[in-house]
Image: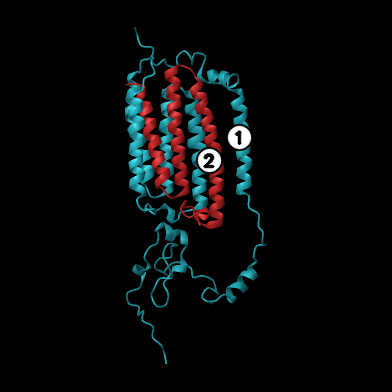
């Protein structure tokens, strides 16, 4: 087996996450799909770290995890705030700027 | 020349066993209706990725993946799911016409491009492997990098983490601008509303003596179910049982007016 297989898996997971962001309507599920995309990117970082024989890729993946945690905290707070005022977690309902 | 890195058979078996499972789980994430099921499938994908990290010599990241992602982040997701509850946005119906075929076409194009790109790209050298870099230990190696070469990004990211925590507190903090209505005011408002139907409180759920669970709407005197007697969340989830099956057979439901 070649290490490329990990990169293929990462690309596939990233694509699936991107489809989820576009297709699903529940804001929380959209968020989970973004998490999937971040995780897929992390997998390729770890794989490249192994290909290059240095730990730099793992350090960057570690930073990505921290950024993802920040993003989840703020994003879920926004979802809760929107839900509190509009009683809906659907991303199609929050379209005030359009009208 | 002997290659620098040979991948052992157990890792190959592990990959071909777990990779299809993780792809299936992430596809299932898109296809299942309930957000809670999506969350559980995502947790599984994250556990698989943690196993891949450990198999690839990233022991620390694998453990952090389990602790931070499947532990903290997914718990936060489930917690927010519990707060927000279930609503119509869970449905898989397409609201923007033609969105789904376009999205799938774009995804196939993007994924195909990525995969074919990866297939054609060459690094120009053999994979090195992490045996040398992990020599004194994976955690020690990472720490040496974090506190020397990457110390500035590390500090910046800690500032980001604190900002995010403060931001979440500011966003989630809720201050009442009007005083909370007292029970007396609520009662007065019920009687002053247009209809007196809810003046004495909403009807409770259940059919007396036959089935008194909260998911069975009460029956009105004319035999029709009372929609106001059950929670809107149960209705949105589709968990309401038809109360007609609990009706007594020998009860005359036609309203007889006595003169």
Q: Are the residues tagged 2 and 1 within 8 Å (C-beta)?
A: no
Task: Please tell me whether residue B15 is drawn above or below residue B165 in the rendered image.
Answer: above
Give how far across and how far down residue B56 sits, in percent.
42, 22
- Whether residue B83 is visible to the viewer of this picture, yes or no, is yes
Task: Please tell me whether residue A46 is drawn above or below residue B26 in the rendered image.
Answer: above
| Residue marked by disc 1 | B160
Chain B color in figure:
cyan
Which chain is indicated by disc 2? A
Chain A color in figure:
red
| Image quadrant assignment for residue A12 | top left
Query: Circle 1 — which element?
Result: helix
Q: Looking at this view, is B240 or B25 the one in front?
A: B25
Task: Please tell me whether residue A35 is drawn above or below residue B148 in the rendered image.
Answer: below
- The label on residue A72 is 2
Q: Looking at this view, is B6 or B238 the one in front?
A: B6
Q: Looking at this view, is A72 or B258 the one in front?
A: A72
């Amino acid at each position: 087996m070649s290490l490329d297989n990990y990169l293929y898996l990462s690309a596939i997971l990233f694509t699936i996450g991107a489809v989820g962001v576009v297709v699903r309507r529940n804001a929380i599920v959209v968020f989970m799909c973004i998490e999937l995309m971040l995780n897929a990117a992390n997998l390729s970082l770890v794989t490249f770290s192994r290909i290059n024989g240095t730990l730099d890729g793992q350090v960057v993946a570690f930073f990505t995890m921290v950024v993802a945690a920040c993003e989840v905290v703020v994003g879920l707070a926004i979802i809760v705030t929107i839900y509190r005022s509009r009683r809906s977690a659907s991303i199609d309902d929050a379209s005030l700027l359009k009208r | 020349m002997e290659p620098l890195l040979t991948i052992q058979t157990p890792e190959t078996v592990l990959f071909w066993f777990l990779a299809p499972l993780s792809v299936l789980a992430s596809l299932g994430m898109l296809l299942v209706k309930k957000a809670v099921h999506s969350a559980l499938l995502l947790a599984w994908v994250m556990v698989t990725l943690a196993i891949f990290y450990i198999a690839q010599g990233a022991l620390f990241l694998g453990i952090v993946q389990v602790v931070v992602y499947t532990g903290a982040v997914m718990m936060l997701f489930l917690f927010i799911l519990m707060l927000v509850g279930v609503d119509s946005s869970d449905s898989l119906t397409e609201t923007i016409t033609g969105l789904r075929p376009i999205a799938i076409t774009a995804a196939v194009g993007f994924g195909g491009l990525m995969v074919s790109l990866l297939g054609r790209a060459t690094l120009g050298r053999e994979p090195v492997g992490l045996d040398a870099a992990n020599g004194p230990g994976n955690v020690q190696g990472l720490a040496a990098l974090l506190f020397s070469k990457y110390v500035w990004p590390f500090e910046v990211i800690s500032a980001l983490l604190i900002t995010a925590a403060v931001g979440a507190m500011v966003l989630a903090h809720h201050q009442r601008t009007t005083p909370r209505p007292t029970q007396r005011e609520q009662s007065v408002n019920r009687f002053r509303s247009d209809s007196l139907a809810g003046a004495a409180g909403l009807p409770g759920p259940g059919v007396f003596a036959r089935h008194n669970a909260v998911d069975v709407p009460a029956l009105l005197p004319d035999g029709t179910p009372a929609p106001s007697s059950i929670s809107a969340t149960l209705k949105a989830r589709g968990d309401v049982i038809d109360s007609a099956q609990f009706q007594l057979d020998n009860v005359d439901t036609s309203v007889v007016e006595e003169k």
